Image (cartoon, grey):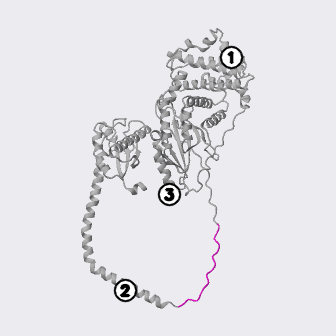
Amino acid sequence: MVKSEALFCRLVSVDTLFSFDGIIPSAPDFQLRLISLIEQLNKALLAESQTPEESEALCRALCCYFDKRLSGNAQNNSLSWQRYSLVQYFYGFVDSDEDLSLSAQLDALLNADSETIFRYAWKLLTLTMQIEGSTDALVSLRAAKRARYFSRARPELPPAEHATASWVSQQAEAAGSPRLMIFVIGPFAGKWFSQSNLSSGSESGILWVIEENANGLAKRMAYLKKNHITLATMAYFPLLADGFESSSIMIEQITAWQYAFSSIHLSDPLPCMLGLYTRLSQQRFPHDPDRAIWTGGLAEPPYGHLKLEQHWAKLLAELDANDEGKDLYAIQRHAVANTLLSWLAESRIMNVIQTLFDSTQLDFAGMTLADHGQGFTRHGAWSLWLSERYGILPGLSASIALPPLPAIPLPPVEEPAPTPSPLPEPEPIKFPRRRRWPKVVTSLALLLILAGGIGYSLFYDRGEIRGQLSRIKPLQGLLEQKDKSEAEAFLKIVNNAALFENGSSNLMPDSQQILTQLVPDIARNPQQMYLIIGHSDNTGSAAVNMALSTERARVIRDWLVEHSGLAASQFIVEGAGNSRPIASNATQEGRAQNRRVEIIPLSMQDYKD
């Protein structure tokens, strides 16, 4: 990528973060960061053989734009940007307003001979219209230069559906059944995507499975192969840019998954698509604000040779090709994605992810980028890097939206080739049948003798058999009653107990004593499977309650694994949110009862079903 384009994208990213209700902790520090970026851009333009006059004119227009943008900020009146004006820093005090007219500067830049200067000026024009509105001068300027902008060379967009899934088995099951099983793996799978476990659409043909460890994935793959299940498989590795507090923690978590996958063996390499989640633009859909705008997807096979950096270049080219000349959101997405790439490269996260694919049986199969959320959920690794580099923190969202799953295209189902009709068998040669009546009569006589003997024996011993049955039936009833009473007592211990604090997955002080009563029964049945269902009260949104209830079930599972000696694979975790209350949520006592967890022993037949 041309260096000047990377620097221009960083300036647009700063403007986009400001649009996200960005926070500027220190105005002097923020001014120095902008000054440094503009100076670097000017040097890069000159190194690319741009004329000094046009390069200087573009940098001056950028100074005017940021001064207007920051001076007109209604929510940060205390910022007083006039004291830190970029135009005054670079060019001193200018008395004439005409010299500072941004539309006049853009008009001159859009007539420049350089296509690079023209392209940057066009994007700056689009940004200017968001703060000044569609004035007559700006609209006429855009209309006059539109033809030149569209005549530029742009990369071709990939087709909506291409041969991305030729690895998918064509031996499909009946219509409507899943044809592709996707394992969601990685450090964010269990916490952020548990609501999608075992989910599938009636028309998508995809079954999503959340797998929180490498050994579990290996067992599922071995089961599919052993039972000759004709279901294609792939993996999806989501990465939330602000999911961890720092880049070093994110690197540690990805490296841990690399070591885990290096220690297992899969019968075949598993295609794996990387998914990145963060907010890239202001675009949101009024009827569905939590809907993500996706870019990228599966690459064309074979996958063993694909490199992450090359696919990033294709993804940025796709974002650039989506810019139709007046789309502010496309400009924002392209710029922020470019800056996101710089963060991944500088923090070595990209190298760690590439090592994950190079050293394991996970084959990098493509990448998708999700422009998602009403704002940043936390100031994590990505946000802190932005603050350190550019002196601005993104605004936080008022609510948490769970990340969605991407759409994976499937190939059409191929009809099986018709099997050739078998050749007609030759008619057997008929021989004259001999009379066999004597053997038939002998056989019938033997059968009658045996039947008579058996009937006599049963008639003679009928009294003894009835006596034995009469002694067994009371014992059988006692056993059934005992099993039923033990199961009911087991469930009664925990299912109606208040175990958690309000709005938290932390166990209350008395919870340890309640759970300790279950340990002897659980340890006595080491082969038993259990379903753990977490619940919450109705405080908070449905999405938050669903995530909280799942986390509560996971806390109980971890406690039981630690104290009972059973493996984590013997517990199935499920969250029900606030959909199944057992008491009224109008009182504090009722809400405490609803913050509970159910532990249900499963029969082997239930587990198989």
Q: Is residue 177 left or right of residue 601?
A: right
Label whose residue precedes the other's in the sequence (3 or 1): 1
Q: CA distance from mark 3 to mark 1?
A: 69 Å
Mark number displayed over residue 449: 2
Closer to us: 262 or 453: 262
Q: CA distance from mark 3 to mark 2?
A: 48 Å
Crowding at mark 3 (Cα within 10 Å: few <14, some 14-19, many 20+)? few
Find out whether residue 430 is within the magenta segment.
yes
At which x and y percent is residue 191?
A: 45, 39
| Quarter that holds the N terminus | top right
Kind of residue at badge 2 = Ile
Q: Nearer the viewer, mark 3 or mark 1?
A: 3
| Quarter that holds the C terminus | bottom left
Query: What secondary structure is marked by label 2?
Result: helix
Label whose residue precedes the other's in the sequence (3 or 2): 3
Q: Is residue 544 left or right of residue 595?
A: right
Q: Is residue 140 visible?
A: no
Query: What secondary structure is marked by label 3?
Result: loop
Q: Residue at x 50, y 89 (%)?
A: 436
Kind of residue at badge 1 = Glu
Kind of residue at badge 3 = Asn
- Looking at the picture, does residue 157 appear above or below residue 54? below
Task: Say which residue label 3 marks.
Answer: 227
Task: Say which residue label 1 marks.
Answer: 56
At which x and y percent is residue 292?
A: 55, 37
At which x and y percent is residue 551?
A: 40, 40
Q: Is residue 302 visible?
A: yes
Q: Are the residues tagged 3 and 1 within 8 Å (C-beta)?
A: no
Q: Quadrant of residue 320?
A: top right
- Looking at the picture, does residue 532 appear above or below residue 228? above
Range of magenta residues = 420-434
